[in-house]
Image (cartoon, helix red, strand yellow):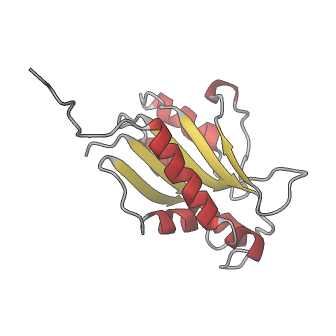
């Protein structure tokens, strides 16, 4: 499979707003994606994501709930992390340690692509299978952000330049 970009939704749908990433992926799948773009709901399966990073990619977009003290629930962020300086420890409420996932991928021999994180500040990550109204209200905005990132950062796959004699 030739993939130029991977959109990875992470989060636990059983923990309220932590289901943000999976919900964004569900809605992205309703849009026609260009060839070479794959959207996967990884849930909390960090090792699965690490193995999938073994394929060559131009871009990895992580969609996740992110704790950001001082910011209101439903606040969206588009981040361009410096992978070398990411701290260890839980960055997201569900316990998937993204720096550990990236380290595991590198240990497996993956060449890490540029990474973008589209995050949303959760209101609640308590046991329940629904997003809070604040987070639900911005899911479509997050989809738009992801699609705009793809448009801006991915070269078209399979298009050959026109050759004129």
Q: Is residue 33 visible?
A: yes
Taking 65 as reference, is 106 left or right?
Answer: left
Q: Residue at x 48, y 48 (%)?
A: 49
Q: Residue at x 72, y 46 (%)?
A: 91
Q: Position of residue 5 (x, y in %)?
A: 41, 43
Compare residues 83 and 157 and report the one nearer the observer: 157
Residue that extends furthest to the right in the rendered view of this protein = 70
Q: Position of residue 71 (x, y in %)?
A: 86, 54
Compare residues 78 and 110 and report the one nearer the observer: 78
Taking 106 as reference, is 78 left or right?
Answer: right
Q: Position of residue 138 (x, y in %)?
A: 68, 65
Residue that extends furthest to the top in the rendered view of this protein = 165
Q: Is residue 44 visible?
A: no
Taking 51 as reference, is 124 left or right?
Answer: right
Compare residues 95 and 68 and report the one nearer the observer: 68
Q: Residue at x 47, y 36 (%)?
A: 153
Quarter holding residue 129: bottom right
């Amino acid at each position: 499979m030739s993939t130029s970009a991977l959109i990875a939704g992470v989060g636990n749908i059983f923990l309220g707003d932590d289901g943000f990433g999976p919900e964004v992926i569900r809605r992205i799948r309703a849009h026609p994606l260009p060839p070479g773009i794959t959207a996967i709901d990884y849930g909390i399966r960090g090792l699965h994501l690490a193995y999938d990073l073994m394929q060559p990619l131009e871009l990895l977009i992580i969609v996740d709930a992110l704790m950001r003290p001082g910011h209101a629930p439903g606040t969206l962020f588009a981040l361009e992390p410096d992978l070398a300086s990411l701290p260890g420890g839980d960055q997201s409420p569900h316990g998937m340690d993204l720096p550990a996932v990236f380290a595991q991928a590198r240990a497996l021999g993956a060449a890490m692509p540029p990474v973008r994180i589209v995050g949303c500040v959760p209101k609640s990550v308590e046991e329940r299978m629904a997003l809070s109204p604040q987070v639900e209200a911005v899911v479509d905005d997050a989809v738009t952000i992801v699609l705009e990132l793809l448009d801006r950062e991915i070269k078209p796959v399979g298009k050959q330049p026109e050759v004129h004699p």
